[in-house]
Amino acid sequence: MMPFTDVEIYEAVKNNIPKVSSYVSSHGGGITLLGVKDGLVYIELIGTCSGCAMSLMTTKMVVQKELRALIHPELNLVNVDGTPENAVPDDVYVEVKEETEIVQKDGMLEKVKDFLHI
């Protein structure tokens, strides 16, 4: 049994994903943290790793193994891959993100667009 709350696990995984994503990134993919429920971490492999035949192996043998070393040896991941058995539960814990306002300063965006000819 994991000695942490779902919120604590979520924060730990969120903070450590950049440390464990180098293998996935090297194959043109990425990792999205979708949430935590009852100590089970739900992720999605994105980019070229999405739908790859080796995605389950990558999740368990690379990502889960490295996160277990960093966080807790009993940490378990589910790669949400579109199958019913790997779906994210409705009541999963996910961090509520605050809306950020995009502010255009001194026409900088327009200057960049002009420079890039777009």
Image: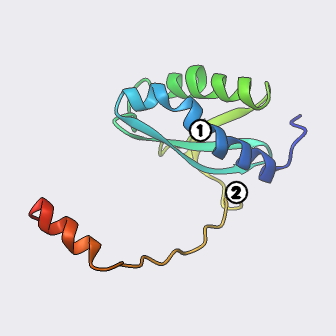
Mark number displayed over residue 53: none
Closer to the camera in the image, 51 or 70 = 70
- Bin the neighbour count of mark 2 within 10 Å (Cα to Cα): few under 14, some 14-19, many 20 and up: some
Q: Residue at x 40, y 38 (%)?
A: 50
Image location (x, y in percent) of residue 19: 58, 32
Query: Can you say which quadrant of the picture contains the N terminus?
Result: top right
Identify residue for label 1: 17
Q: Is residue 50 left or right of residue 61?
A: left
- Bin the neighbour count of mark 1 within 10 Å (Cα to Cα): few under 14, some 14-19, many 20 and up: some
Query: Can you say which quadrant of the picture contains the C terminus?
Result: bottom left
Q: CA distance from mark 2 to mark 1?
A: 18 Å
Q: Is residue 56 left or right of residue 37?
A: left
Q: Are marks 2 and 1 in contact (CB under 8 Å)?
A: no
Closer to the camera in the image, 85 or 14 = 14
Image location (x, y in percent) of residue 25: 41, 32
Image location (x, y in percent) of residue 32: 52, 46
Q: Hey, which quadrant is residue 103 in on the image?
A: bottom left
The kind of residue on which mark 2 rests is Val
**Extreme-left residue of the structure:** 117
Q: Residue at x 39, y 36 (%)?
A: 29
Closer to the camera in the image, 53 or 59 = 59
Tell me the SS state at disc 2.
loop
Q: Residue at x 61, y 52 (%)?
A: 88
* Mark positioned earlier in the residue sequence (2 or 1): 1
Q: Is residue 8 above or below residue 99?
A: above
Identify residue for label 2: 92
In this picture the colour scheme is rainbow
Callout count: 2
Q: Nearer the viewer, mark 2 or mark 1?
A: 1
